Image (cartoon, rainbow, N blue to C red):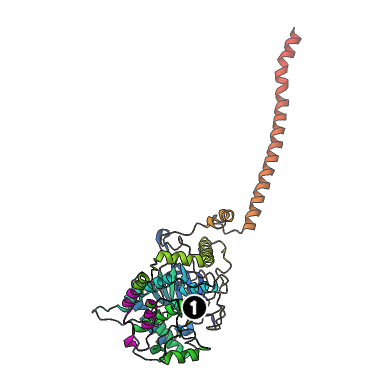
Amino acid sequence: MNVGQPSGAGHPNAGLAAGDTLDRYELLCPLAQGGMAAVWLARLRGKHGFQKLVAVKTIRPEHAGDQRFQRMFLDEARIAASITHSNVAQILDLGEENGVLYLVMEWIDGDSLSKLLRVVQRAGQRVPLGVALRILADACGGLHAAHELRDDSGQLINVVHRDVSPTNILLSNKGSPKVIDFGIAKAMGRLAEETSAGVLKGKISYMSPEQALGRSNVDRRADVWAVGSILHMALTGAPPFRAENEVLALHRLTSGKPPDPLPADVPPQVRAIVAKTMAFNVDQRTPDCATLQAELEQAMVACNCLTTPADVGLFAAHYLADSARTRQELVQRSIAAASDRERGGRPRMHSAGTPSGFSPVAPRDTSSSGALGAGSGNGSGRGNASASSSGLVSPFAAASNPSMPSMPATRLEPSFQRWNTAPTGMSAKERWIVTAAVLVTALFVGVVGAILYTAVMRWHGSKVEPATTSPTTTTSATR
Ligand SMILES: Nc1ncnc2c1ncn2[C@@H]1O[C@H](COP(=O)(O)OP(=O)(O)OP(=O)(O)O)[C@@H](O)[C@H]1O
Ligand SMILES: [Mg+2]
């Protein structure tokens, strides 16, 4: 175990650095960081070169130290770990190491829906209706699987996500949405009650009125509301209850009045879906995510905009190409740096091995801001980061393949890598000095050898010559 000791007054990563390990997980590079938690790309190493890339969410020690929070976090994460669905990021492990509470998740090679919505909006466009419907229909499939989770005796556990938002829906590079952060909102909510009055910041855009009103009997229909409000956001480009500030937005949300109107070109089938998912009275709301999923699928047919996950993938790839490239480079560099560390050589990545080395990290996706949202890396809390989060995680398809061994570093810097494969731990400068010394020595040996050879040949010639001429001389004298 090699966890950076919590240095972290105010730092969300608590002194953790690339190369540190949390149990079996080697941290490779930070992907996002916020006021309460940080997300790392990490790898799980096995025998015979096996490695699997994972995402590790670490909670700051000062929060993780709260016993009730810790219990709630672990309880919720344990439950969430049993959700198995292709549209939910699988929780693989969880633990605590030197005060760092962490959650290990399936690593999703892609960007958040919030980032896609933001980039599309910046380009002056709107997400096509079919793309929005497909993403949310698939996300509903994942949510429903979670809502239907039962205990060993077959009883419903009543899992509710509580924080379904565009930041908590990641889009894989295949266009498949993956819901993340199941159950964490509950624990975070309890923590925030005590630590931050601003917990609702950015959250209320997708929060159900019953949650905002603090009702205790929140059920799956809160997540139905959230999906409806994301659809509303995707169709309008703005939160459903626009207001000058969060307090006013909260007031509108809890007033029982309907959200802002949808644009005139939204088809009636889709309007009806939004209205029903965002019914203030929970009993008048779409009852569950399976029903909502079916309605969204039907709307795609009715509106003649049938869209597949592959279509979503193409659309996202078009708008998020830069981000994907940045991620690819980040993952390649992180893996190459890890290989360097393994060989004992010097890390190639500037940040690797240095607790403050967070340079490759984009700020957390804050366009719609989350409970954790917004750390700019200085731990100053939520809401203060630049919204321009570029290059978070990695769309490096090969790297996401669990069975793939370390990235062949030659793909990065071919000439440098050939040097680097020698397990000497020497720097490039040292290698050049050694090479020059070897060449000078070889030249010296060559020159000395040539001189010696010439001298020997001359000496040999002077010895042999009289013997070859003498018989002739003798003969001639005899004659
Ligand atoms: N399993 C994962 N795979 C890949 N990237 C991830 C994963 N989980 C989180 N991330 C990355 O980390 C970013 C931050 O995620 P996180 O859930 O910690 O914060 P948030 O969504 O901004 O806040 P909150 O969940 O409190 O609303 C995501 O936008 C995503 O880029
Ligand atoms: Mg999240």
**Stretch in magenta:** 269-295
Q: Check disc 1 and report its element: helix, strand or loop.
A: loop
- In the depicted structure, whether residue 415 falls above or below residue 78: above
Would residue 294 be counted in the magenta stretch? yes
387 lies left or right of 450:
left
Quadrant for residue 450, please give it: top right
Q: Position of residue 86 (x, y in %)?
A: 36, 69
Amino acid marked by disc 1: Gly
Using the image as rendered, state which of residue 445 and residue 26 is in the foreground: 26
- In the depicted structure, whether residue 131 falls above or below residue 442: below
Q: Position of residue 120 (x, y in %)?
A: 51, 72
Is residue 415 in sight in this rendering?
yes
Would residue 131 be counted in the magenta stretch? no
Looking at the image, which residue sits at the far right? 477
Tell me which secondary structure the magenta stretch mostly adopts: helix
Name the residue that disc number 1 marks: 237
Residue, x 44% and y 63% (percent of image)? 400
267 lies left or right of 4:
left
Q: Position of residue 283 (x, y in %)?
A: 31, 87
Using the image as rendered, state which of residue 275 and residue 387 is in the foreground: 275
Which quadrant of the figure contains the N terminus?
bottom left
Q: Position of residue 358 (x, y in %)?
A: 56, 73
Callout 1 crowding tier (Cα within 10 Å): few <14, some 14–19, many ≥20: some
Quadrant for residue 262, please give it: bottom left
